[in-house]
Amino acid sequence: MFSMKPDFAAVLERFEAWWQAGIIDRPLYSLSLPVPPEKRVPVPRKSFACPRERWLDSDYVVAAAEARLANTIFLGDSLPVVFPNLGPDVFAACYGCELEFAESTSWSRPILKDLSEESLSGLVFDQHSEPFLKLVEITEALLQAGRGRFIVGYTDLHPGGDAAAALRGPQELLLDTIDRPEAVKKLVGRLTDDFFRCYDFFQRRLQAAGMPGTSWLPAVARGKYHIPSNDFSCMVSENMFEELFLPDIIRECRYMDHSIYHLDGPQALRFLDRLLDIPAIQAIQWVPGAGREGWRRSIAVYQRIQSRKKAFQIQPVPAADLDELFSLLAPEGAWISHISGISTIEEAEAVRQKICSWTRRR
């Protein structure tokens, strides 16, 4: 189906089992290697006056993605996935927020001066806005270039609390949660409704092109796949999270066939058990934050998730640490998203056999 991943059908079946915290033949692991130097294709080179020009140059974006994928050997359950990317605030930008671009990320400028009825009535998700049309343009270009070769996913969409913070400004939204909590709930509900329409717009196009569900987090699924999140929640209490934001997170997840929650930072960890209570959240991506990297520091979190029969993504693991990891976790529901310390196909094959033995041990 995809020439860059001939065994895609088997990988999809493993992911379908993983979503249920199960296993077919072995746990999921992702491992990639660069192609030999003599077989690499040239990476496109082009001069730009500013980062914005590069981000919005669809031809360059597609050519760069093609080169990156062509120069990679996708082993294990790693996948040749690419998606249109204008940064994490692109959803807010479709309401009129201006996007500022840097080399590796972008951010939006807030436009919502308050949460009055007048301000909210003027807030409209615009499918004719420059960011939305650019997402459509890049998506269609990627689909055309990748037909039969690689997988195209939907962009990084952040509705809910993160979109509200982008539109209003984080500090202002924090005050709103105290001064006008009902207005915050109304705004978040509006954003969720618009998110469904935006998501379906791209989902229909990707599905019509034969694409599985995927995005910036390169899990894969049949049907609707989503990565719910709320990084803003790190700044509010458990009660406020429960009252103002969790209902729409649940709505997002129930709308989908498969959801993996992006739990980012130590201040978000206090919400883990409540999120694990939600049946529509099938998996957790735990991101411990800068200075807390390393799978060992997160082993207790993985064990909590596993005890609730949910799937989870494991931080990158050095090949030399695999036996230790296997002694601390069961294979069910585990996805090792990257294995480091591997430089040859032979070493990669040894890793595959070791992971298969983890399954047999159980």
Image (cartoon, helix red, strand yellow):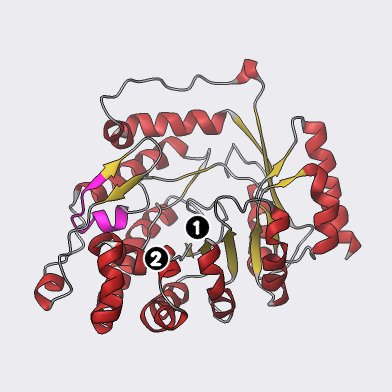
Rendered location of residue 147, percent (x, y): 47, 40
In what element is the residue under mark 1? loop
Furthest residue toward top: 38
User: Can residue 185 be seen in the rendering of this structure?
Assistant: no
In the rendered structure, which segment of residues is drawn in magenta? 90-99
Label 1 packing within 10 angstroms: few (<14), some (14-19), many (20+): many
Rendered location of residue 237, percent (x, y): 43, 78
**Figure check: 46 above or below 51:** above
Q: CA distance from mark 2 to mark 1?
A: 26 Å
Q: Quadrant of residue 22?
A: bottom right
Q: Amino acid at mark 2?
A: Phe
Whichever of labels 2 and 1 marks the residue nearer the N terminus, that label is 1
Q: Amino acid at mark 1?
A: Gly
Judge left or right: residue 237 versus residue 54: right
Rendered location of residue 12, percent (x, y): 63, 56
**Figure check: 324 above or below 37:** below
Furthest residue toward right: 361
Image point (50%, 57%), residue name: 213
Q: Which mark is residue 232?
A: 2
Q: Say which quadrant the C terminus sits in.
A: bottom right
Of the residues tagged 2 and 1, which is closer to the observer?
2
Furthest residue toward left: 118
Q: Quadrant of residue 51?
A: top left
Q: Which mark is residue 213?
A: 1
**Figure check: 201 above or below 344:** below
Q: Quadrant of residue 192?
A: bottom left
Judge left or right: residue 246 versus residue 13: left
Q: Say which quadrant the N terminus sits in.
A: top right
Pointer 2 and pointer 1: residues touching (CB < 8 Å)?
no
Residue sitting nearer the eye, 270 or 73: 270
In what element is the residue under mark 2? helix
